[in-house]
Structures are given as structure tokens and as C-alpha cells.
Image: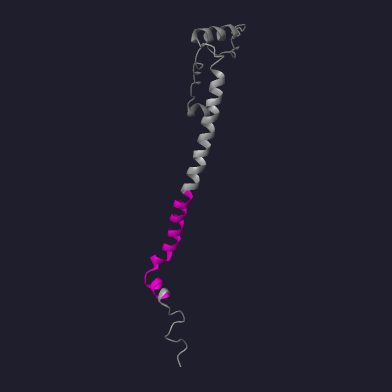
Amino acid sequence: MPPFTRNPLNSDPLHRTLHHYPLLFGIPFLVVIVGASFALQTFTQTRYDLHDQKVTQVNKETELGLKKNRKKFDIREEYFKLEAARDDNWEQKRVPRLPGMPEWGLPPPEPEPPAQSKSSDKA
């Protein structure tokens, strides 16, 4: 008797089909995901519709209350208010420069000392 039988334990037709076509294994998962997406679409649409209805209702109520006591807006008036509120009590001060630093930019490069010849070093 051979150690392994030629007859597999799982010989049902579903197992054989999935064994021959492994891509069919993921189809139930995809069906559940796509079906759940379509099922949840109605719930999310209802949620957004209710939220939109609540926001427009509040806006209409506040709009009715604001139209009575509305003040006319003038951009020039707002500009002059800002100009009057600005604080002009400041003085520009210069930062003291380091010694040898020019007024603008980097300091001029220092000249290199003349190189001494090697023959003078030996003597």
C-alpha cells in the first residue's frame, strides 16, 4: 500500500473548481464589499440631506433677524478705522556694526601675507 492515497480528502466540486481557478476565491469578498457600498449609500445620503436641511433652516432664521438691524458696509470707513487704530509711536534704530564691518555687504577680503620661499626656511 502506498503511503498516500490517490484520492484527495476534499474531492467536492467547489474545492476542485477553486483549485483549478484560484481567482474565483476572491469573488465572494468583492461581492460583499461592493454590495455593502451600495447599501450604505442610501444611509449616507440621508445623513447629508438631514444635515443640509438643518443648516439651511438655521441660516434662514438668522437671516430674518439680521436684515432688520443691518448697517451699510463702506470699505473707506473700515480703512480709516484701521488707520486710526494703528500705532505709529515707534522709532527706527540702527544695529551697531562690528568694528571693521562696512556699512553694506560683506567686509573686504583681507590680503594674504606674502609666502616665504622654502630656501629661506632652510637657512
| Magenta stretch secondary structure, dominant | helix
Q: Nearer the viewer, residue 83 or 92?
A: 83
Q: Residue at x 46, y 48 (%)?
A: 41
- Residue at far bottom of view: 1
Q: Residue at x 44, y 63 (%)?
A: 28
Q: Is residue 79 in view?
A: yes
Q: Is residue 93 left or right of residue 9?
A: right
Please tell me whether residue 22 is drawn above or below residue 6 in the rendered image: above
Colour option used: one colour
Among the 4 quarters of the image, the one containing residue 13:
bottom left
Among the 4 quarters of the image, the one containing residue 12:
bottom left
First to last magenta residue range: 15-40
Q: Is residue 71 magenta?
A: no
Percent x, y of residue 53: 51, 35
Percent x, y of residue 39: 47, 52
Q: Is residue 93 in view?
A: no
- Residue at far left of view: 20
Please tell me whether residue 42 is drawn above or below residue 84 in the rendered image: below
Q: Nearer the viewer, residue 8 or 121?
A: 8
Please tell me whether residue 38 is drawn above or below residue 59 in the rendered image: below
Percent x, y of residue 120: 50, 26
Q: Nearer the viewer, residue 35 or 19?
A: 35
Q: How many marks?
A: 0
Q: Is residue 24 magenta?
A: yes
Percent x, y of residue 19: 40, 73
